[in-house]
Image (cartoon, rainbow, N blue to C red):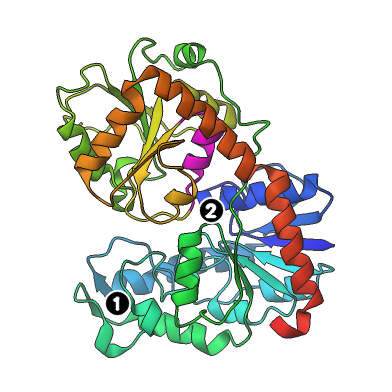
Amino acid sequence: MKVIQLSFSDIVGGGGFRAAYRIHHALRRHDIDSNMAVSIKGTDDWTVKKVPDTKISRIIAQARASVGYLPHRLWLKTENPIIHSPALLPSRWPDLVNHSDADLVHMHWVNSEMLSIADIGKLRKPVVWTLHDMWAFCGAEHYTDGDRYQSGYFSDNRPSYESGFDLNRWTWNRKHKHWKRPFQIVTPSHWLAACVSKSALMRDWPVTVVPNTIDTEVWQPIDQKLARQLLSLPTDVPLLLFGAGGGTRDPRKGFDLLQAALEHLRGQMPQLQLVVFGQGAPKDQVDLGLPIHYTGRLHDELSLRTLYSAADAMVIPSRQDNLPNTGLEAHACGTPVIAFHVGGLPDIVDHYKTGYLAKPFDTIDLAKGIQWVIIDENRLNSLSICSRQRAIDNWSPHIVVKSYEKIYQNVLENNSKYF
C-alpha cells in the first residue's frame, strides 16, 4: 500500500503539521509505504518531498500566500482574531497527486497556501482527511464558537461581530459547490468528530476518531532534578508549565484565564512558580504574584522532553482545542495536565487520574485544580505514573497505526462508495 501524506509543512508552524509528520513516520515504522508531500520543508528527511522550486513557482507561491489572506484583511471586518483561509488560488498539487503511483491520499492541513477548495475537489484518488481544526466544514474560519457551520452560512445568521463582505459564506458555498463526493474524515478528538457530524457540509460523510500519535519510547520522563538543572530552573519549588505556539498572545489558548486562576491562588501557594514556553519574556510583564520563567521557543524533542520533565504539572487553559500535542507530550513525560473540560482535552486528561478537568472557563475551579494536583506529593507521584501509562496505552505508534491501517483498507475496498 502506497500512501501520500499531504501537509502544508512537515514540522514548520502549528501543531497539526508535527502531528501529521509523526503519523507519517509511525506508518513507515510499521511497514506502510508512506511518503510526505509538503509546500514547506523544515527537515532533511528524504521521505518528505517538496515540489522542486522554479522561479515561476516561487512567485506563484508568494502570491498564493499573500492573496490567501487579502480577503480577510480587506473585506471581512471582524472582532474574531481567528485566522481565516479562503483557499482561493489553484496549484499543481491535483495533477501531481492524480498522476502519482500512490494508492491513497491522506490529507492533513492543506488549505490556503497549498490547495485551493477547487483543487481538493479535483483529487481522483481515494482520500482520507485528518482534520486538525474546524476549517474543513466551516467557512473560511479555522475555529468558531458559533453555529453557522451546523445550519449553513446564510445572510440572516451572520454573527453581529462581522461586517463587510461575507467571506465565510462565500468560502462555505465554494466548498459546497466543489466537494461533491464524501471523503473519509478522521478527527483526533471526539469533540471534533461530533462537530463534523453536526455540520451542514459533512454530516453525511464518514468520520472516525483516531488520536494523534507520540513515540513513547522517545518521549520518556527525565529525572526532574537533572531536568531543572539543565534548564537553569529552581530545583526546590513547585513548577507549573504553560506553553502555546503564540505564547500568551493567542486568546484561544486562554492565558488570560490562567492569569485569573493564579490571582485566586495569590498567597495560597507562596512557593509556586510558572514556566512559559513558546515565547520570550515580554517587554511589559504581567504581575501574577509569582515568579515567571520564559524559555522562548523550543523546537527539538530533547529540550521539550527536558522541560516537561522539569515541571510538576502542565496547565492548558484553552477555550477551544482539538487534541493539543502539548498534552500528549506532557503525559508521555509523566507530567499531569490541568485543563478545562472543553474540546479534545477530555480525550487527554482522565479526571482525577492523570490531572484535573475544570468546569469550562471557571477560573476558580481551574485554580482549585492547580492546587489539587500540585499540593500533595504522594498524589502528584500517582498522577505522574498514570499520565505516563495513559500515553503508552492510547497514543503509542502501533495503536494509532492499527487504526489507520483499518481505515485505509476500508476506503480502498469501498472505493466506489466514497468516490
Kindly indicate the quadrant of the structure image that contains residue 270: top left
Queried whether the magenta region covers residue 260, the answer comes back as no
Counting residues from the start of the chain, the first of labels 1 and 2 encountered is 2
> In which quadrant will I find the N terminus?
bottom right
Q: Nearer the viewer, mark 1 or mark 2?
A: 2
Q: Nearer the viewer, residue 231 or 340?
A: 340
Residue denoted by label 2: 16
- The percent coordinates of residue 57 (x first, y second) are 63, 66
Q: Which mark is residue 99?
A: none
**In the drawing, does residue 191 fall left or right of residue 419?**
left
Query: Mark 1: which amino acid?
Result: Trp
Q: Which mark is residue 75?
A: 1
**In the drawing, does residue 210 fall left or right of residue 319?**
right
Kindly indicate the quadrant of the structure image that contains residue 246: top left
**Which SS class for mark 1?**
loop
Extent of the magenta region = 323-335
**Which SS class for mark 2?**
helix
Q: Nearer the viewer, residue 390 or 400?
A: 390
Measure how far apart labels 1 and 2 are at the Cα level: 28 Å
Kindly indicate the quadrant of the structure image that contains residue 104: bottom right
Provide the major secondary structure of the magenta segment: helix
Residue 308 can be seen in this image: no
Query: Mark 2: which amino acid?
Result: Gly
Queried whether the magenta region covers residue 334, the answer comes back as yes
- The percent coordinates of residue 106 (x first, y second) are 68, 64
Residue 317 can be seen in this image: yes
Badge 2: residue crowd in 10 Å (few <14, some 14–19, many ≥20): many
- The percent coordinates of residue 205 (x first, y second) are 58, 79
